[in-house]
Amino acid sequence: MAPSPVAPLLAAVAESGMAATLFELGGVLGGLALLARLAARLRFSPIPLYLVAGLAFGRGGLVPLGLAESFIETGSTIGVLLLLFMLGLEYTGEELSANLKAGWRAGAVDAGLNLVPGIAAGLLLGWGPVAALVLGGITYISSSGLAAKVLSDLEWLGNRETPAVLSVLVLEDLAMAAYLPIVAALLVGGSALQGALSLLVAVVAVSAALLLSLRFGGAVSRAVANRSDEVVLLSVLALVLLVAAGAERLQVSAAIGAFLVGIALGEPVSEQVRSLLGPLRDLFAAIFFVFFGLQIDPTSIPPVFALALALAVLTSATKLATGWWAAKRIGVATRGRVRAGTLLVARGEFSIVIAGLGVSAGLEPQLGPLAAAYVLVTAIAGPVLARFSDPVVGALQAWWARRKPSGQPRTTASAVAPP
């Protein structure tokens, strides 16, 4: 039998480590391109497809690949930072300040509805208070990265409910600046004083960053602005990465740092930055979602899947209630309220970070698989619910209108109000 014409190519690839790495990465990117093309044809967010692809090709998956994980991990981190940075570009410091003042009640409702179920579930499972607090953090924090991607994919950035959603997300991210240092101190058995000092450093760092973005945002924009796209691109990337590194060093979320840099960059440079970084954001964001799937061993999911699914259903309902309430407060109609809730359903990067802290500290053995299954379910359910929320709500409104007696109006104010 004649040898296959591709056999020499495959043999050469196998002999070269660098060639094998490039071959694998090229294959992954080619697969992502096909998934993105399929999602675009279906008018659907590609995020769930990216997550399932990572699950299939990671350790324990259907076709495990020996990918260059250090490169992919770094790329996924950059993807999260660019997602949050581009989200910050949509709002000025003044708008952020106004949203925070108007949305703190929604943030309090969000914490009450979504932190408590996780803590209660941990205690009902017989876990210790620290492990229960960790599970509460996992169920509390929505994925800003997933929300930003869905907003972009579905072209919802200009919707009336979007400021309410962003207020909730920003308050959650700022809450993480207090939550993470406290949990880290508890996990290492630190004293109350150490936890208080960590919290103080985080609060001071976030407050200083907010002040700088509000008071000196114009100066930052003028320093970055340049006729050369190359200069602007390199300057912005350097600024985002350096600020994110500084925030992480101070035990504040790097994502918060990237978000605040986006807020600080005002017009006219923000429009130029959007056009330059948009494709780069999409590339690294796709890598992030695939890498998340690669970290999950599918064999660890079945024993805890029923529990994760029940917790996901409960906390998806509480997130929908949070979004509904927050959007209703600013006068958004029914469809917009539902859209706001669906944007908050997905959990992602922060939940995985919190779970990683608990697993590294040797907490409950079920914590890691449970968190992985829970995040995967909500990360898939969130974009799916968002994509189909408008047609489902429209069909329900039409059905309800048909049920009304002929002597009553067939529509309600919320049904005919602009979305």
Image (cartoon, rainbow, N blue to C red):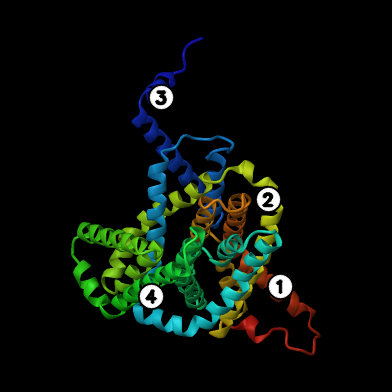
Q: Residues within 10 Å of mark 4 (few under 14, many from 20)?
A: many
Q: Nearer the viewer, mark 3 or mark 1?
A: 3
- Using the numbered discs, state the Cα–Cα distance from disc 1 to disc 4 in whole angstroms: 34 Å
- State the residue position of label 1: 396
SS state under label 2:
helix
Q: Residues within 10 Å of mark 1 (few under 14, many from 20)?
A: few
Residue sticking out furthest to the top: 1
**In the rendered image, the vertical position of residue 234 relative to residue 174, given as above or below:** above
Q: Quadrant of the C terminus?
A: bottom right
Q: Residues within 10 Å of mark 3 (few under 14, many from 20)?
A: some
Give residue 293's mark: none
- State the residue position of label 3: 14
Q: Nearer the viewer, residue 301 or 238?
A: 301
**In the rendered image, the vertical position of residue 34 relative to residue 244, given as above or below:** above
Give residue 91's mark: 4
Q: Percent from the top left, x then y, of residue 247?
A: 35, 64
**In the rendered image, the vertical position of residue 60 relative to residue 340, given as above or below:** above
Q: Nearer the viewer, residue 69 or 266?
A: 69
Amino acid type of the residue that numbered disc 1 sits on in the rendered structure: Leu
SS state under label 4:
loop
Q: Percent from the top left, x then y, of residue 54?
A: 52, 45
Amino acid type of the residue that numbered disc 3 sits on in the rendered structure: Ala
Q: Residues within 10 Å of mark 2 (few under 14, many from 20)?
A: some
Q: Nearer the viewer, mark 4 or mark 2?
A: 2
Q: Are marks 4 and 2 in contact (CB under 8 Å)?
A: no
Marked residue nearer the N-terminal end (2 or 1): 2
- Using the numbered discs, state the Cα–Cα distance from disc 2 to disc 1 in whole angstroms: 34 Å
Q: Percent from the top left, x then y, of residue 127?
A: 65, 59
- State the residue position of label 2: 304
